[in-house]
Image (spheres, rainbow, N blue to C red):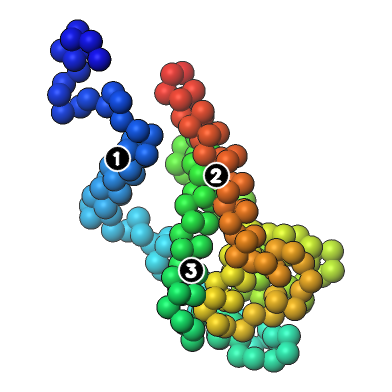
Amino acid sequence: MSAVTAELVPERDVTYGRSPLSHFVTDLWVLVKRSIARIRREPETLADVTFQPVIFILMFAYVFGGAIALLGGGNYHEYLIGGMHTNAADVIAAFALALLFGYAFTWAGICLGMTLRSPEAAQQTGFILFLPMVFISCAFVPIQGMPGWLQPVAEWNPMSAIATACRKLFGNPNPAAAIHSWPLQHPELAVLCWSAAMLVVFAPLAVHLYRRKALG
């Protein structure tokens, strides 16, 4: 670095020569701090990740649960609400897969937000696009009970892969294991593949959309 460059850049803000990993960790920490600060000021922003999942679970457990039969029998409540009846390594692996999948899927949401004009439009469009992915999967109901033409869609749905992987690792009823479909026979590997694919596609696209919007 030349003397002129060193004089122009404040000493505490020098980023020249830092590795991409260092930039990533710094940016991640800034986003985490901003998110925590916003949650402190506006606790209601957590409603969609706290109250909404509880409402869905209660509805399926006590309203629809009595009409849903599991292949080979079993308790639907155990199928719906994963419990940890297994070893620590499997539990850690399940949480790691869920975090990886959630992180990768977030980039798709970022791309959606970058292409729309307002937060409200992004929220509504995301609800329309992503909610069917949850329901057309084995997250709430067994795939075997779906119409024949819809079953392949559910089998290759990324949500089915993560739900099956977590049920398998947590040691819960897993009717999807009886389906001879590659993602459901190898759910952990399928989650890794889906996560990698989403990161490869949506992360660079999100950065490109952000830069185009910032420069435009």
Label 3: state its secondary structure.
helix
Looking at the image, tell me whether mark 2 or mark 1 is earlier in sequence order: 1
State the separation of the CA atoms marked 3 and 2.
Answer: 19 Å
- Can you give x and y, in whole percent of width and height, for residue 207 in the image? 48, 32
Q: Amino acid at mark 3?
A: Ala
Q: Quadrant of the N terminus?
A: top left
Q: Is residue 47 left or right of residue 78?
A: left
Q: Is residue 100 left or right of residue 194?
A: left
Label 2: state its secondary structure.
helix
State whether residue 93 is above or below residue 66: above
- Can you give x and y, in whole percent of width and height, for residue 59 in the image? 54, 78
Nearest to viewer (mark 3 / mark 2): 3
Q: Which residue is mark 3?
A: 93
Q: Which mark is residue 199?
A: 2
Q: Which mark is residue 26?
A: 1
Q: Residues within 10 Å of mark 2 (few under 14, many from 20)?
A: many
Looking at the image, tell me whether mark 3 or mark 2 is earlier in sequence order: 3
